[in-house]
Amino acid sequence: MANLTLQHLDKIYDNKVQAVYDFNLDVKDGELIVFVGPSGCGKSTTLRMVAGLEDITNGKLLLDGKDITRTPAKDRDMAMVFQNYALYGHMTIYENMAFSLTLRKEDPNVIHKKVLAAAEILNLTTQLNKKPAQLSGGQRQRVAMGRAIVRTPKVFLFDEPLSNLDAKLRGSTRREILLLHKRLKATMLYVTHDQTEALTLADRIVCMSMGHVQQIGTPLELYDHPANLFVASFIGLPPMNFFDVKVELGKLAGKGFEIPLDAHDMKRVQKYVGKEIVLGVRPEDFVEGGDIKISVLSNENLGMNTLVNGHIVSEGNKFDRITCKFRGWCNYKNGDVAGISVKRMHFFDKETTNAINEEK
Amino acid sequence: MNEQQISLDRMRYIKNKASSNLAILAILFDVLYFVNLYKSDVGSYYYTILIGASIIYNLVFLLAAFLASEGVKTYNESYSYLLIVIGVIQFIRIFIMPVPAHNSYIEVINSTTKEMESIQVMKSSQFIRQIIYLCASGICCLVSAYIGIVRSRKLKAYEATLGEEKRRD
């Protein structure tokens, strides 16, 4: 059992730079939490504070109710997997995986059983006598994971473990991590800047920016109901399209287009009538055919879908850039004018950048 | 898998460090031996072909013992036999340099009295040290070889059973 609680964590460095502001999170036993955000948003710093590699300036860290804020890293019963693997080059894979247990002076036969079990899980049995230099990047990362597994820690910490791998290997290793989590049912914190990794792996995502938590929720919550403009722009690939629009009675008026609002949407933006808001539309929420005209710049066929980039046009004038993701195979040429309509919209307050939700 | 089998299985992944370290220790004792011998300054007693041969053999010993230490590390039985050979030679060496030197006396001029005097080439204290170093080096080689042979045979037998199991599967 490992319930981890982060209460009002702050990180202020000696040079007075604050990297993390008031971080609060309750991680349930067996949950896989992914910290996602752009470089420098404080996600790795938070993870390192949890691991004990960085001091916590303010706040409390509780593991199963026990305060471990000032506990040294080695006594926290957590195992960390780093981006650069951090394997010992002169040791074999077996020795690398056994090393932490050897340092703890565990019985060699017990160590052997644990190492073989971990190697079996990670499909590394045939590699145990090799040196790290003889393995591929993905295999090395699996060794790093194996080294964490043999310790049977309460919490696994992953700091961008897939960033050094090529795209194909990243996909397969990601699936292995997911299977590993299902098999071990362990509490895991995972840091990444890749929103695809976050969406595919996480039970819950913590989206961060500039040291602040922007939103905590399931992947679907973050995708379907982003809390603000930052989350909306960060989650989803290709990113959401944003337009400045004016709310009028029964419709939204943007540059070069108008979108009628149904009763439900009108209710959401009722108090903004006469004001400007930000309209967000995911590329996949556009459908072919409609009153909004776009001048096509590029047509990228991806097999199941087609990405169409262009400009909104009206009466010969070009307005905002737009990216649409249509189902199936399209054959637009540069300069073609296509009609589109909107299936689903997200509204954001222009001043606060927060999402505009239905008032309860 | 019982405890004994686990210990055997471990050998597939763990190097034979005991044998390897003993071979290195044998090198260390040999170094102590030749440093202790070559620092001797007793007239022209040592200026013979024997000292040249001793230097060359020391180099050969260092190389052979080091190669053997690496070989036994990976349970290669043939390197254990090499260790037996060089280990036995270490004992024989006692009778090539230290014993004759201990039994020999040479005439030298005393630097203070300026008179000729007879001195023992290798005094008892140095002789005992030399014997200890060579014996220790030889013992290390032989023990290393013994452990190496026992372990490599055990591992071979265990791997043969694994092969049989695989064939049965």
Image (tube, coloured by chain):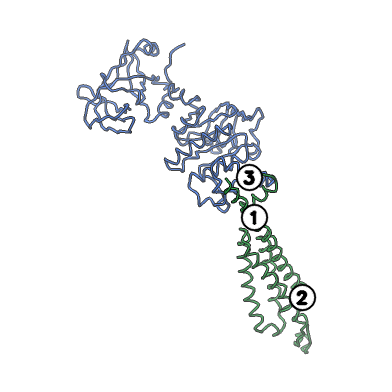
Chain depicted in blue: A
On the image, the x and y values in percent for residue B113 come to 79, 87
Instruction: Kindly report the distance in space between the C-alpha atoms of the residues bearing marks 2 and 1.
Output: 45 Å
Chain depicted in green: B
Q: Which residue lies under the disc numbered 3?
A: A100
Which residue is found at the position 70% from the left and 75% from the top?
A: B37
Front position in the image: B92 or B38: B92
Q: Secondary structure at mark 3?
A: helix
Q: Is residue A210 visible?
A: no
Please tell me how crowded label 1 is: few (under 14), some (14-19), or many (20+) other residues with Cα within 10 Å.
few
Instruction: Kindly report the distance in space between the C-alpha atoms of the residues bearing marks 3 and 1.
Output: 30 Å
User: Position of B116 compared to B39: left or right?
Assistant: right
What amino acid type is highlighted by mark number 2? Answer: Phe
On the image, the x and y values in percent for residue A319 come to 26, 25
Q: Which residue lies under the disc numbered 1?
A: B157
Q: Is residue A358 above or below residue A209?
A: above
The circle drawn on residue B127 is 2
Q: Quadrant of the N terminus of chain A?
A: top right
Residue under mark 2: which chain is it in? B
